[in-house]
Image (cartoon, helix red, strand yellow):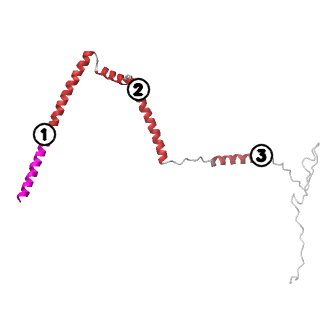
Amino acid sequence: MDEVNAMAKAGETVGKAVGTGMKQARHSAKLASEQGMVLSKQAAARAERELADRGYSTEELQELIAQRATGKSRKELAKQAKARRAEWEKRTTESRKRLAARIDPTPVKKRRRWPWMLLLLMVLGLAAAAFALTRRPEELPLAVADDEPWDSHTPGTNPARHRAPAEADGHLPEPPKVETPRPNPPKQ
């Protein structure tokens, strides 16, 4: 049993040592960041003083660095960056649309032509009806048995060429009925 207790104590002591080391590491990291912040502020102040001694402000220095690196001023660079961003956006939207069309193509709607065909048929029908109405023969009045044609009494007119028989009224006469003999006479 002594081994078990010894191993348990060893685990506790190692755990305490690790915990203490972690605490010390966190504390040291905090001190290092604070000192780094102080030193960077001092270095920035020293750099500004040196720039002021030479006659440059921080904004002018940024402009000079950008101009030496690219050969253009910051305004030109900003304008160029804006144009490039707009062009980039345009290209990406176009490529997204093309990719979406390749992934899930939507069927192209075909135009319906039957309304035009109906309209065309109606126009043709109206034209045919108008043509038929203009080419219609004049109707002549039917002759009555006792009457003469209405214009026969008018001087200078031609007499009527045709007169239908009065009993037919323009229709064909019915054929005469013929009785057929019956084989058996009727009983009375």
Which residue lies at the image location 43% right of the left edge and 29% below the top edge?
83
Dot 1 or dot 3: first in sequence order is 1
Q: Depth check: 86 or 50 in front?
A: 50
What residue does disc 3 label? 131
Which is nearer the eye, 141 or 98? 98
Say which residue appears at 26% left-offset and 18% top-offset.
51
Residue 64 against residue 167 in the figure, above or below:
above
Q: Quadrant of the N terminus?
A: bottom left
**Given the image, on which type of amino acid does mark 2 rest?**
Lys
User: How far across and how far down the image is residue 127, in percent?
Assistant: 74, 45
Q: What percent of the width, then of the height, locates residue 60? A: 31, 20
Crowd tier of the residue under label 3, counting other residues whose Cα lies within 10 Å: few below 14, some 14–19, many 20 or above: few
Three-letter amino acid code at the position of disc 1: Gln
Instruction: Please name the residue shown 9% across and 49% down the image.
Output: 13
Image side of residue 123 versus residue 143, left or right: left
Name the front one of labels 2 and 3.
2
Left or right of 169 in this view: 114: left
**Residue type at tag 3:** Phe
- Give the residue at mark 1: 24
